[in-house]
Image: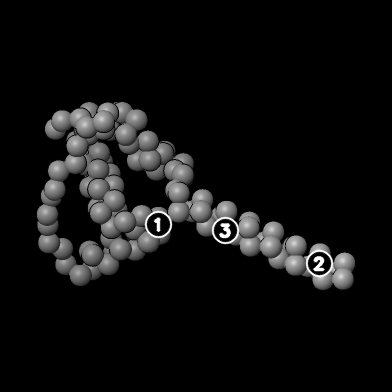
Amino acid sequence: MRAVDGRMARERVQTRCDADTVESIEQYADDRDISQSEAVRRLLRLGLDAEGYDSPASLGGDNVERLAEREGYVAANVNETARQVGTILLLLALLVLALTWVIL
C-alpha cells in the first residue's frame, strides 16, 4: 500500500452483511457520530489488531483516533465540537434575551 500526502492510501473492500450486522454497524456509527464507512474501517482494524494483525500504519499518527479509542480516551470529533459551540451560542442568546427583559 502506498502513502498519499503522508497517509496510507485507501483501497476499496466490498462485502455483504446480514441485516443484524448492518444494524449493529449503523448503531456503532451513530453512537460515535461517524459515517458507516468509518465505522467499518475502525471495526475491521480493531478486529485485526485484536487477532494480532497490527499493520505498519497502526503505529503511525494516522491512527491516533484508533489508539485513543483502544486506550479509553475520547478522540475529538468536529461534529461534536460544532454541537457544543452551537449550544453555547444558544445559551448566550438566551442570556442576552433574559437580561434585555430584566432591564426593560
Alpha carbon distance from label 3 to label 2: 21 Å
Mark 1 residue type: Asp
Closer to the eye: label 2 or 1: 2
Residue 10 placement, left or right of 30? left
Q: Position of residue 78 (x, y in %)?
A: 45, 49
Q: Is residue 60 visible?
A: yes
Q: Residue at x 40, y 57 (%)?
A: 33
Name the residue nearer the viewer: 22 or 76: 76
Alpha carbon distance from label 2 to label 1: 37 Å
The quadrant holding residue 20 is bottom left
Res. 5 mark: none
Q: Position of residue 37 (x, y in %)?
A: 25, 54
Relative to 46, say whether 19 is above or below: below
Q: Position of residue 9 (x, y in %)?
A: 19, 37
Residue 64 placement, left or right of 85? left
Mark 2 residue type: Thr
Earlier along the polypeptide chain: callout 2 or callout 1? Answer: 1
